[in-house]
Image (cartoon, grey):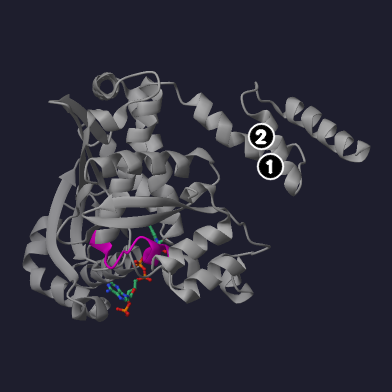
Amino acid sequence: MPKFYELSREDRIAQLLADARLSQAAATHLLANEPLPEATAAHLTENQIGQFPLPLGVVHHLQVNGVSREVAIAGEEPSVVAAASNGARMANLGGGVTGVAPDMHVVDAEIVFANAPEVATVVQAHRLQIFTVAESAHPSIVRRGGGLKAIHTDTTGQFTKIILSVDVQEAMGANIVNTIAEAVAAYLEATTGLRRLFAILSNYSEQTTRAEVTIPHAALATKQATGAHIAAQIALASQFAQLDVSRATTNNKGIMNGVSGAAIALGNDYRALEAGVYAFAASTGTYQPLSTWENSEGQLHGVIELPIQVGTVGGAIGALPLAKVSQQLAQITCVREEQEVLASLGLVQNLAALRALVGPGIQSGHMALAAGSLAISAGAKGSEVTVLTAQLQGKKQSLALAKTLLAQIRQQGEDK
Ligand code: NDP
């Protein structure tokens, strides 16, 4: 029986449908490959002149908290889905990934004042009114069980800020929080004479989602090396990343390859997500890897911790039909689950990258998969892409070589 990656696109969708990972409507939508409706596209950006399709791949069977999930990734880098699928395969041999998201989904806003040391006292005096103003600014989030939960102040040099911590429930929350922050700022200006510098949410968060996995050595073995050797090398590479910012940066980029691509597929604001994640990596004052790996007693143990500011509703999610399909594929029913799936994806992505790095290196796998893009860049069309991609395997790839091979393929076609 062919493996999932060996199937045609249509057969993959048929399999996902047969396995009840997709509804009939979602399968039909995927098969149709339809662009966004014009009205949607026109309203999601100013000055719209077209659409920009990216391929949507799926990480097959990533087990998170005991549930096997299909995690869709939108992106242009050919090796991302392949590596994450490989990482998922190894993680599943260890029983899958366990993820734990924060109990409450909180986003902070900052109302900043310059040269106003009285802000803390003013906030103390107006505390109850601030809660009332916040509720009137966004009553529906309060009805949903969320809304303003805490108020703090903080002074740095000449600046004092009021920090409003808002429970945004299932939303990513930027608009909700900005609405509340501006209403509270306007109230304070009107009643106290204070003048704010600005009021906006912060994309920084120390509310992290944690995921971990324990993998038996046997699952890590490569053609050239034992699993025990690979595990020891991965643990060493992890230690190095904690000491070396150059490596930590690349480690974290690799983690975000999958996480950002999945956030896009889920219709989320990946810029907000990335801003928070990379800032958190430097939260101790020294830029650190988001993941750590330790090797002991025949097992490799990996942990990832990162803030994941996303939502299952709001923003553009409702306007992008594929975002709902991605939620369905990953069996995401709430924002906590979404955060746990994304953190777990980052961890297995990192595992696959590290195993390749300390083993055969990443270039062989990357170049094998990149050959398809190169073939298309050289001008291959239709079935030529498959033939040229196959011919490029194992060769020192370049655009010039791809063009030469393509010319030969076409010449042979004419000679027949
Ligand atoms: P929305 O403004 O769309 O707010 C989410 C809405 O979803 C709520 O107003 C709520 O409306 C509705 N909703 C339905 N069900 C729920 C639920 N269970 N829990 C919570 N809300 C629910 O989006 P966000 O506030 O999430 O903001 C995200 C957007 O903001 C993204 O598009 C992002 O790009 C953008 N943005 C990001 C910034 C940043 O990151 N720095 C800055 C500014 C904007 P109702 O209750 O009335 O049904």
Query: Which residue does the image show at 20% across and 48% down from the upper left?
Result: 98
Disc 1 crowd, CA 10 A, few/some/many (<14, 14-19, 20+) = some
Query: Which residue does the image show at 40% across and 22% down from the upper left?
Result: 223
Q: How many marks?
A: 2
Against 148, is 401 above or below?
A: above
Is residue 150 toward the left or the right of residue 287 in the image?
left
> Which label was assigned to residue 218?
none
Q: Residues in magenta?
A: 325-336
Residues under labels 1 and 2: Cα distance?
6 Å
Residue at numbered disc 1: 386
Against 78, is 353 above or below?
A: above
Q: Please provide percent x and percent y for residue 402.
A: 74, 30
**Residue type marked 1:** Thr
Query: Which residue does the image show at 60% across and 74% down from the upper left?
Result: 37
Q: Please provide percent x and percent y for residue 117.
A: 15, 51
Q: Find residue 241 and report its image quarter.
A: top left
415 and 230: which is toward the camera? 415
Q: Describe the element under mark 1 as helix, strand or loop.
A: helix
The residue positioned farthest toward the right in the image shown: 415
Q: Please provide percent x and percent y for residue 326.
A: 42, 62
Residue 375 appears in the figure: yes
Check residue 335 for magenta coloring. yes
Is the residue marked 1 within 8 Å of ligand 1, measured from its CB?
A: no
Against 366, is 105 above or below?
A: below
Q: Please provide percent x and percent y for residue 233.
A: 28, 19
Find out whether the residues at labels 1 and 2 contact each other: C-beta distance under 8 Å.
yes
- Where the C terminus falls, by quadrant? top right
Q: Describe the element under mark 2 as helix, strand or loop.
A: helix
Residue at numbered disc 2: 390
2 and 300: which is toward the camera? 2
